[in-house]
Image (cartoon, rainbow, N blue to C red):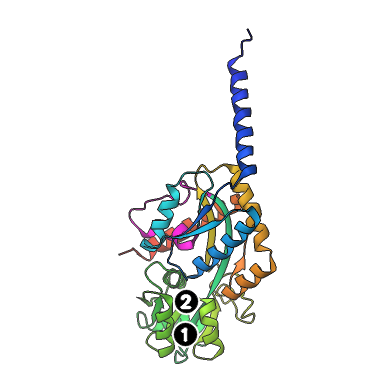
Amino acid sequence: MIKLTKSAVSAAGLAVAVVSTCAIAQTYPSKPVRLVVPFVAGGPTDIQGRMLGEKLGQRLGQQFIIDNRGGANGNIGMELTAKAPPDGYTLVIATVGTWAVNPSLYKSMPYDPVRDFAPVMQVSSSPGVLVVHPSVPAKNVKELIALARAKPGKLDYGSSGVGGFGHISGALFCLMTKTEMVHIPYKSSAPSLTDLIAGQIQVLFNNAISTVPFIKSGQTRALAVTSLKRMAALPDLATIDELGVKGYDNSSWSAVAAPAGTPREIVARLNSELNAILRLPDVMEKNASFGADAVGGTPEQFGDYLKSEIGKFARVVKEAKISAQ
């Protein structure tokens, strides 16, 4: 009879586990995969998720089913994913708000953005634009800052809602420039843009794709881009950072993740496929139509970026005294 030492038994067990994990990764996926979108159908995250899901299905030979779970500013869909089995058959595509802003915005969160997820990849980054109504005398960022300082609390800026991209962008701008503007929350970005054009509000930090047509028509005046990088659609429009507010950077971004504990080999395969998908000409064209830049990269890169974004927005939310109602 052959006796095995404890170390030999442990090594054998580890070898079996490695072989088993590799086998799972090689056969993955063997059934349909659920891709959770924590927002209602029809929005930019939903459109992007459906595009990526279709491409993943074509490349991996299984259907990627979009599961829209809107509500609570994205928290419902994120919680659903966090509590799903970590087997690679539930994924989520979500935004900067659900990943990095909500944890500071809400007093009680049903998930931890770092502990409860296995990062797969940051998918895209979309810069916003700072625009004003043509009646506003400020012709550039420097003049807007001077106007806001001369008339504290007299300029209104709109957003898609408390904690949304426009709200956080405006709060960050006010904090960094030591100015005071009044935040006017709307139910979505569309009515805030409508009211800006009508002159009901004076300032708006908004997504580029819906705002560019009104910049080009002269119905709004563009002052700057909110990211550190200029936009291809408006190459002559400088960034807020370039125009003197050094370090100002806020973009709307999206990313894909799985529940924490998902096998690393499955995460690596999804990451590889998504990186390849982002390089496809039709996907690049579609992203450009959204005003988005493809990001890609490794799971580790997204994990590090996420932690830095959580820290940045925690400071903004605290200093601006923002809270969800």
> Left or right: where does residue 156 sit relative to residue 34?
left
Residue 250, position in %: x, y? 52, 68
Magenta residues?
A: 93-118
Q: Is residue 203 visible?
A: yes
Residue bearing mark 2 = 205
Specify whether residue 107 is painted magenta.
Answer: yes
Q: How many marks?
A: 2
- Whether residue 73 sits left or right of residue 251 in the image: it is left
Q: Residue at x 57, y 60 (%)?
A: 53
Q: Which residue is outermost to the top?
A: 1
| Callout 1: SS | strand
Tag 1: Cα neighbours inside 10 Å, few (<14), some, or many (≥20)?
A: many
Q: Which image quadrant for residue 26? A: top right
Viewport quadrant of the N terminus = top right
Q: Locate residue 283, reporting x and y percent.
A: 64, 67
Q: Quadrant of residue 183?
A: bottom left
Position of 117 with respect to 272 (left or right) is left
Q: Residue placed at 65% from the left, 63% from the top?
A: 278
Residue 16 in percent (x, y) is at: 61, 29
Spatial CA distance of label 2 from label 1 is: 9 Å
Residue at 60% from the left image edge and 70% from the top image edge? 287
Residue drawn at the location 55% of the way across and 48% of the way down: 31
Amino acid at pointer 2: Phe
Quadrant for the C terminus, please: bottom left
Is residue 295 in the magenta section? no
Q: For the residue marked with disc 1, what is the amino acid? A: Val
Residue matched to label 1: 132
Describe residue 175's horizontal placement relative to residue 153 as left or right.
right
Q: What kind of element bears circle 2?
A: strand
